[in-house]
Image (cartoon, grey):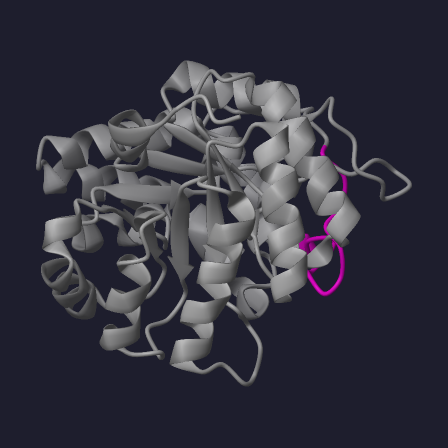
Amino acid sequence: MSHFQGAALRTALNGISGILVTPFDADDRIIGAPLKPIVDRAVEAGVHVLVANGNTSEFYGLQAIEAEQMVNIAAETVDRRVPLLAGVGRSVHEACSLARASRKAGADALMVHQPPDPFVAPRGVVRYVRQIADAAEGLPLVLYLRNENIGLAAVEELCRIPEVIGVKWASPTPLILAEAIRRTADLGLAWVGGLAEVWAPPLCAVGARGFTSGLINVMPERSVAIYNALEKSDYGQAMRLIEEMLPFEELRAQENNGTNVTVVKTALQIMGNDCGATRAPSAWPLQDAQRHQLDALMQGWSLVS
């Protein structure tokens, strides 16, 4: 059952949502041990929420049974120190099954991935989320919107589903986000910038106080420093801190964003916290030039000697 509820959970979502990697062994099987130092570093640094089965977790590379395995490992590792958000998605029946498993594992809320189906009706997405809410039996939901193609009317209808307590906005459209926030101001939702640190300042400026981060797997202190600067409305300091980690995010965005998790997992290997390879269709391994750039970055950050 959920440990963090109500106002405490909403407040945590106004902070950093750290998206955990899924560790694999040499035989490409999920293992839990490498996750512990990642979670410990994040919690000690002050990351507010941890997320299993997000995109940095390679959610779409996992089989359904593996996604269930991962949320159980994450719940055991996080051990109620901070709220655990569990991603659900893909077919509606898979999403509902994983919602039930996540609730049983002890997740505090669900993050509903936006359906990638090529035939998505706005009213169909509303039905999709309502079915997941029913399966979750009262567990709070956070919507994960990678685009606003369903239109603001449908976004508002989704926000007014009673179980929805927050929205992760992963679209570089701050003005549309501002309008979505205005239309739902009476609901007291938590709005989370879903494009990590680089887009946190403009999204924060219109009302998304929280932001997501894959960097927390490697350097959570930097993410927390950026968050603290934004909380003080010190945008100059936030931008200086972001500029220093921008090469890391630019590396992650290469190859059609296909090195996103590759860079994170390679950095973890360099640190001695090996979480295995990424799965196809993600890029693996880094190309020589990419690896040299990452090595130099991490030496510059004193993450390796």
In the rendering, at what x and y percent does residue 291 appear? 64, 48
- Examine the residues drawn in magenta and state their main secondary structure: loop
Looking at the rendering, the stretch of residues picked out in magenta corresponds to 275-289
Give the residue at the far right of this rendering. 27
Q: Is residue 120 left or right of residue 205?
A: right
Q: Residue 220 falls in which quadrant of the image?
A: top left
Q: Residue at x 36, y 55 (%)?
A: 195
Q: Quadrant of the C terminus?
A: top right
Compared to residue 200, the image places residue 128 above or below, namely below
Q: Position of residue 273 (x, y in %)?
A: 68, 26
Q: Is 17 positioned to the left or the right of 263 in the image?
A: left
Judge by depth and name the residue closer to the eye, 42 or 5: 5
Q: Viewer-proximal residue, 139 or 242? A: 139
Determine if the magenta segment contains residue 71: no
- Residue 79 x %, y %: 56, 16
**Is 279 placed above or below 255 here?**
above
Residue name at image x 54 percent, y 85 percent: 119
Q: State whether residue 215 is above or below residue 7.
A: below
Residue 251 visible in the displayed image = no
Determine if the magenta segment contains residue 279: yes
Q: Quadrant of residue 123?
A: bottom left
Question: Residue 147: horizontal and vertical position, in percent?
Answer: 37, 71
Nearer to us in this view, 292 or 272:
272
